[in-house]
Image: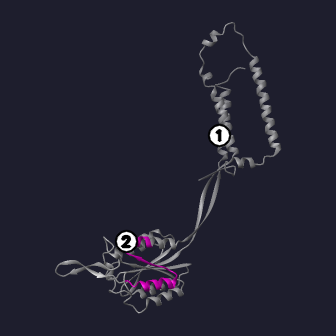
Amino acid sequence: MNIEFGGFSVNMLDLIDVNIPPVIIFVIGALVIFSMILYHLKYRRFKSTSIKYSDIRIVKRAALSSRQRFRFVLLVLRVLAVAAFVLAFARPRSGTEYQEVTSEGIDIMMALDVSSSMQAEDFKPNNRLFVAKEEIKKFIEKRINDRIGLVVFARYSFTQCPLTTDYGVLLNFVDQVDFGLVEDGTAIGMALANSVNRLRESESESKVIILLTDGDNNAGEIDPVTAANLAAAFDIKIYTIGAGKSGRALYPYQDPIFGKRYVYQPTKIDEETLKKIAERTGGKYFRARSGEELEGIYELIDQMEKTEIEVAAHIQYKELFYYFVYLGLMLLVLEMLLANTYFRKLP
């Protein structure tokens, strides 16, 4: 809600800059002087009208009536009326602001590895896939006006959710991602090719793929670098994330006799290939060795791929000065009625 008086802010410099015609200044000055002369003549006439008493002690002992005690109300009414007229001359207005938001959204495909190696529990207290899903959901919730889709891959790749702005549906699809959806393996090239296929006909100014994996390409008919070249041809940027600690990590193992057990297995991430994929497309490679690092990576990508939003503001004003005019007139009428009835006095 914007309140404006006279079309400018109340500032001494603004008041100095206001141009008032000399004729108006002369008329106002003449009215003030004429009012002072009338008041002086009236005061002298009232002062000359008096009654002489030989002893005024009786008058002093006389108590004031209610009319005499509350006669100051007339002055208060007049002052309030003048104040209301002054506010009316300032031309107060109330404004309602309307905003038109235009944005150039970004199309983003999330490629998520669901191979068995993502069961490693080096992102304590949960495995890599669980932490990756949670960070992906946080990333989605921060986006505005972007179309986001999800591709999952192991030995094969498929689209879990196409590009959409319905983030509620997308988050449900993310929750449904689990192990066993696809035969085990790591087809990074196929995941990139599938993502590129979803983005190639996009008319968005910016197209991005965010690939998260913890292994090296060991399946699929398309080489990861070839898929990266394909993405570059369609002006698609790829951010790659290698998930997992260096060295060995704990993997769960289901023993038929003793039940669930854990074994140490080496972590194999083809970082060189992931770096080449990012470099070929103008993206960047990140290494996440913990859940905190992965959260920071998604936050950094969120900042790097911000949607440009333009806001045009329009203000619709409603005039309020006539409320103060009505108030001032009512106060003057009330003062005149009281002065000539309840508070009437003889000269």
Binning the other alpha carbons within 10 Å of mark 1 as few (below 14), some (14 to 19) or many (20 upward) gives some
In magenta stretch: residue 282: yes
Q: Main secondary structure of the magenta part?
A: helix
Task: Give the image location of residue 156, x and y in percent.
Answer: 37, 87
Cβ–Cβ below 8 Å for labels 2 and 1? no
Task: Give the image location of residue 181, x and y in percent.
Answer: 33, 82
For label 2, the SS is helix
Query: Cα distance, mark 2 to mark 1?
Result: 66 Å
Q: Nearer the viewer, residue 132 or 277?
A: 277
13 relative to 161, above or below:
above
Which residue reaches farthest top?
A: 54
Task: Give the image location of residue 325, x and y in percent.
Answer: 68, 42
In magenta stretch: residue 278: yes
Residue in view at x 65 percent, y 43 percent = 324
Q: Is residue 161 visible?
A: no
Residue 291 figure quarter: bottom left
Residue that numbered label 2 is attached to: 291
Q: Nearer the viewer, residue 16 or 205?
A: 16
Q: Magenta residues, as a range?
A: 269-297
Query: Closer to the N terminus: mark 2 or mark 1?
Result: 2
Residue 123 figure quarter: bottom left
Residue in view at x 59 percent, y 60 percent = 98
Q: Residue 327 has which mark? A: 1
66 relative to 266, above or below:
above
Left or right: 308 as drawn, with respect to 142: right
For label 1, the SS is helix
Residue 240 figure quarter: bottom left
Q: Is residue 316 visible?
A: yes
Residue in view at x 40 percent, y 72 percent = 293
Q: Amino acid at mark 2?
A: Gly
